[in-house]
């Protein structure tokens, strides 16, 4: 189920002291071309089903771009101005992305990233949520009741997929993939303050080797092993 972020946070903070018992939260990171939105959506449904060992009165939700929208509201900015921080660009370092945007609230102002961190932290601690991308692993990794998944696939497989889906040639597809992959790594590094590493993740899945239902089942089983419910 897709999340209504503001209602979700208000309700979760009302019924739970998140400072004492944060989570549970699942983060899903992915290489570009590894579709994850349907996986996050169906995983939330699977974890919320009655009779499921992880099912509680609180249904699981999934969240993605809503993080940007919530952050933008708190900063009184257009969401696209914050999204720019996390999107591919011709520049090749995060600082250049920040410096290239001119506004009263410069993107090199640490307040923007601090706000994004606070929003991700609040969502993560509120619990029963699957956060897709946005460098969320860099923040939610510190929560005990958490599971962190990385979806990968061979470059050639992703090039074919992106080329077909975006109707572009393989050269353009490869360029798009490499640029997106780079910035997803930079996003995590910038938010976490340390070099990117696969050690951040609990499970790494090659989506070229599993069907979507199998991927969902594997993640679901991992949540059961870690007992991400209370």
Image: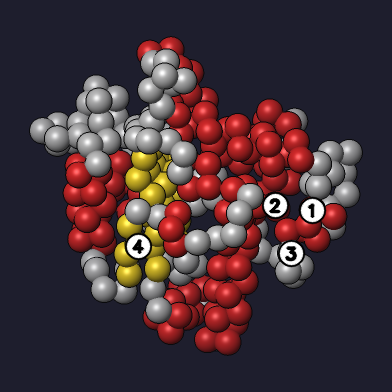
Q: Residues within 10 Å of mark 3 (few under 14, many from 20)?
A: few
Task: Tell me where residue 226 sits by quadrant.
Answer: top left
Q: Position of residue 23 (x, y in %)?
A: 38, 31
Q: Is residue 165 above or below residue 124?
A: below
Q: CA distance from mark 3 to mark 4?
A: 26 Å
Helix, strand or loop at label 3? It is loop
Q: Residues within 10 Å of mark 2 (few under 14, many from 20)?
A: many
Q: Which residue is mark 3?
A: 93
Residue 29 as seen in the image, left or right of residue 88: left
Which is more N-terminal, label 4 or label 3? 3
Task: Tell me where residue 189 sits by quadrant.
Answer: bottom right
Helix, strand or loop at label 2? It is helix
Q: Which residue is mark 4?
A: 204
Between circles 2 and 3, the one closer to the viewer is: 3
Q: CA distance from mark 2 to mark 1?
A: 7 Å
Which is more N-terminal, label 3 or label 1? 3
Q: Is residue 70 something one can see in this rendering?
A: no
Question: Mark 2 near mark 3, Cβ–Cβ under 8 Å?
Answer: no
Q: Which residue is mark 2?
A: 85
Question: Mark 2 near mark 1, Cβ–Cβ under 8 Å?
Answer: yes
Q: Position of residue 39 (x, y in %)?
A: 33, 54
Q: CA distance from mark 1 to mark 4?
A: 31 Å
Residue 153 as seen in the image, left or right of residue 121: left
Q: CA distance from mark 2 to mark 3?
A: 11 Å
Q: Which residue is mark 1?
A: 98
| Residue closer to the observer: 8 or 133 | 133
């Amino acid at each position: 189920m897709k999340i209504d972020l503001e209602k979700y946070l208000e309700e979760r903070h009302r019924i739970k002291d998140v400072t004492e018992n944060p989570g549970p939260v699942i983060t899903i990171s992915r290489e570009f071309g590894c579709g994850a939105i349907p996986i996050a959506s169906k995983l939330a449904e699977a974890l919320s089903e009655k009779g499921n060992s992880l099912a509680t009165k609180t249904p699981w939700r999934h969240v993605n771009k809503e993080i940007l929208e919530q952050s933008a509201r708190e900063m009184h900015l257009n969401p696209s101005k914050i999204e720019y921080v996390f999107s591919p660009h011709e520049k090749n370092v995060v600082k250049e992305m920040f410096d290239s945007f001119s506004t009263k609230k410069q993107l090199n102002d640490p307040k923007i990233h601090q706000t994004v961190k606070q929003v991700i932290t609040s969502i993560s601690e509120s619990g029963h949520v699957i956060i897709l991308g946005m460098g969320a692993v860099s923040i939610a990794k510190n929560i005990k009741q958490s599971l962190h998944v990385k979806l990968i696939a061979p470059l050639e497989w992703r090039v074919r997929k992106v080329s077909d889906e975006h109707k572009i040639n393989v050269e353009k597809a490869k360029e798009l993939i490499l640029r997106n992959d780079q910035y997803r790594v930079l996003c995590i590094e910038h938010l976490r303050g340390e070099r990117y590493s696969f050690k951040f993740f609990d499970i790494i899945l090659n989506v070229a080797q599993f069907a979507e239902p199998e991927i969902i089942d594997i993640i679901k089983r991992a949540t059961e092993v870690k007992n991400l419910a209370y």
